[in-house]
Each structure stands twice: as C-alpha cells, then as structure tokens.
Amino acid sequence: MSTEQQKEIEGAAEYLQFHNFKSVMEWITAEMILSRPEDPFQFIQKLMKRTIKARLGDPYNPTSNVELVRRCYAEAAENADETGAVPGRGDGEDDDEDSEDEDFFGTKNNKRGGSRPSSAPQEGVIDKVERLEKMVESLRAMASTLSPAAAIHGIIEETCKLVSSDRATLYLVDPVQNDFQVYTKEGASGLRLPLDLGIPGSVLKTAKVLNVPDAYREKQFDPSEDKKTGYVTKTLLAFPVPDAEGNIVAIVEAVNKKAGKFEKLDEEILEIMRVQAGSALANAVLHSKLAHSKDRLDAMVDIEIMINKSLQVNNILSTISGNAHSLIGGDKCVMYSVDRSASEMVTGEGLRFPLDKGVPGYVASKGEIINMIDPYNDPRFDPSQDQKNNYKTNSMLVVPLYGAPVENGQGSVVAVVQILNKLVGKFDDDDIAFMANFAAVLGPIVEQSQLFERMKQQ
C-alpha cells in the first residue's frame, strides 16, 4: 500500500470519527428497526428532514449524534413490543407537518416563539420573489376586467403561468342549476357536472387545496375525459376560489406540472392568488348580471312601446309572442288571450284551444306560475302541438297575466304567456321573477285591449 493511499484512508477514518458517523449509522439502523418502513429510502429522507428542522437553524454538532441514539433506545425500551417494533409508529411522521413550520421565504418558526433563518441555502428565495412579482402582475390583470368570460380566461391563463402547468380547467359553481359549468382556455366547454363529482366535488366539499402527485392513483379522479380525448393526466393541483364573503364560486384544476410534480411553493402561490381571483370573478359576474338586467328592462320597455301603438288584441299577442322569449333566453314564446265566454284561449294567429286543456289552460284556470323541467313526465302537458309542429318541448315557463285589481282583491286571469326551452340551463328564480313583473305590467294593457275589441263588436 502506497503512502498516498495510506494517507487517504487515514483521512477518511479521521473524517468519520470526527463526525461520529458510527453513532449516525447506529441511530438510523435503530430507527429503521423501530418503524419497519415499506420504503427505507423515503423513510430515511423524512427522518433526516425532521432532524435538520428540529435544530431550528443551529449549526451541525457531531456530539448530538450520541443523543439521537440514546433517545431512540429509550423509546424502544419504553414502548417496543416483543418483536422490537413500536406499535403505531409506522413509517414515521409525515414531513408535510414539519413543512408548515417554514414560511414562504424558508424562515423556520421557533416553537419557543419568534423565527430564525433556516441554515439551508436560500437560493430559492430569488425564485420565490420572481414568482411573487409574476403573481402581482396576474392579480392586476384579473382585476382589470368586468367580463365573466374574460375573468375566467384570465384565471385559467394565469394559473398555468404561475405554477407552470400544461393546462388548467375552471369549474364554475352554478347554485341555481346545482352543478359545475366547465371552462377551459378555449372557453365554455358545454359540459355540466354534478357538484359532488370527482376532484372538483371533493375540493368544493373540503374548501382546501388538493395536491395530487399521481392522478390515476387518486380514487376521486375521474379518467373519463382522458379516455375521451386521449390526453393523459399525471399530476393535479386543485384549489377553491372564494368570493369576498368566503362562498366558493369556482374550483380550478392545474393539470400536469411541466417539470416534476407540484410543490409546496405552488400551493402557497395559489393560496395567495385564489382570494383575489374569486373577488375578480364575483365582481365580473355581478357586473354582467346588472348589465343583463338593464338590457332586459330596456327590451321590456321597447315591447311595451310597440304594444301601446295598437290596442288590437291580435297585435299585442303577436308582439309579445315574437319578443318575450328573448328576455329570459327562451327558444320561442306563445301568448294566449283568455276568452271566458267561450271557455277558450286564443293565439295571435286566431288559433283556439280549450280552456281546460294543457298547461296554459291549467295556468289560466288556477292562476299559478308553472316552471316545468320535464314536461313529458307531467300529466298536465299536452304533447299534441309538439307532434303537429315537429317540435320537442324540454322545459317551459308559463305565467298568468292578471287584469286590473277589483274591489275584492286580484283581478282575473286575462292572458297566459308560455315560453319554451331555455337555451342554456333551466328557467330559474330570476327568470320567474322577471316574467312575473313583466306580466303585472302587461295584464291591464291586455285587459283594456279585450274590452276595446268587445266594444267594437257591439
């Protein structure tokens, strides 16, 4: 053996002796025996991570290794069973709990109070600052729009940018229809999913960020869309988007981290971003509703102006039939005038129907508003007109129009408005309230026109 080789061996031995490496190996071995982990390498990684964090930033001290061995043997003597394993110890504690002791910039929170910098290198701080700057730009961009479509597109785009994901999907909560509306970067997909389905449903229920490192091993993951499109989902990071009151208005899924898996930093970034994203989305939706309400009121006024140009019943019925459905997003509208002397209902085209037949006849007789989601399963529905016109009624909103109030209370039903097939979703409470107000304005006008027609005939 050469002199240089001898020096190298002696140097290595001195290094191991100085760092008390024999105690380190004895400690790791004892920990493995106590825990019996399924994956020894992952167990050692977690063990080292917890031990370093427990130093609270103090420098490494070789003499501490003996104390590690002592504590390990003490635990074994106190708690180990006849096989030498400590019951319930398993693979050891999850290092995710320890990671909560480290803030966004890697500062360790001292359990005795206060904080001290981590002894680990802080190269990642620069990256974190850069990503924070990107996030500020993203928040500014999201807050600058009042269009729901633009806000949704912005949230999806900025999510992909901030966490470096291949794509993202936004599931907008529709409390009226009680489901999710699905949006991608390209816009509305047309899909509607139950609120309790898959990962979006789980995040909606727990209101917490969900990091899925392997989608196909996650029991809540729904692979049906992958099978349909051929796309393979590997990693997922899903987070809830709340409004200013804390109500969850959407769930966003970031899909497939471009490099590796989603990290704790990605979760922290989205935790900060999601609150502003929720406010931006809620403000855009509210502004859109206000603008839509104004447009509907303007359209209603235009219809009333057209009606007041003529007192003829047929003109009024035709005007309402041709325009009323557009006010609430229906496919078509039929207006019936009630002729009680003949026990019939009359359309603007002069078609007559028995007052005791079909949903319009029921509404004219009972004076109730009817909102049908599936008319073919309702015995009051008469499918003969669908068969005659080669039309399929999927939903309908039927509203009575009352004449002027009488001395003893409400006037009688003078007409019925029937709007068929909501183009998007179903007729909701907002549609019902709007049409009820519209009917309250139209009812006395229709009644006056009916009186006018009778006077002309006499």
Image (spheres, rainbow, N blue to C red):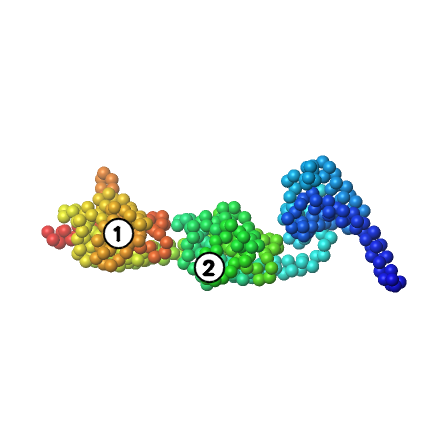
Helix, strand or loop at disc 1? strand
Question: Disc 2 marks which residue?
Answer: 227
Q: Is residue 146 visible in the rendered structure shown here? A: no
Residue type of the residue flagged with mark 1: Val
The residue closer to the viewer here, 318 or 131, is 131
Separation of residues labelled 2 and 1 (CA atoms): 45 Å
- Farthest-out residue, left: 458
Q: Is residue 84 visible in the rendered structure shown here? A: yes
> Which of pointers 2 and 1 indicates the residue nearer the eye?
2
Compared to residue 68, the image places residue 305 above or below, namely below
Residue type of the residue flagged with mark 2: Lys
Residue 262 location, quadrant? bottom right
Lower sequence index among marks 2 and 1: 2
The residue closer to the viewer here, 358 or 19, is 19
Helix, strand or loop at disc 2? helix
- Quarter holding the N terminus? bottom right
Residue shown at 72%/39% (left/top)? Answer: 76
Q: Is residue 429 left or right of residue 227?
A: left
- x, y percent for residue 399: 27, 49
Residue shown at 71%/52% (left/top)? Answer: 118
Number of other residues with Cα within 10 Å of mark 2, as a class: few under 14, some 14 to 19, many 20 or more: few
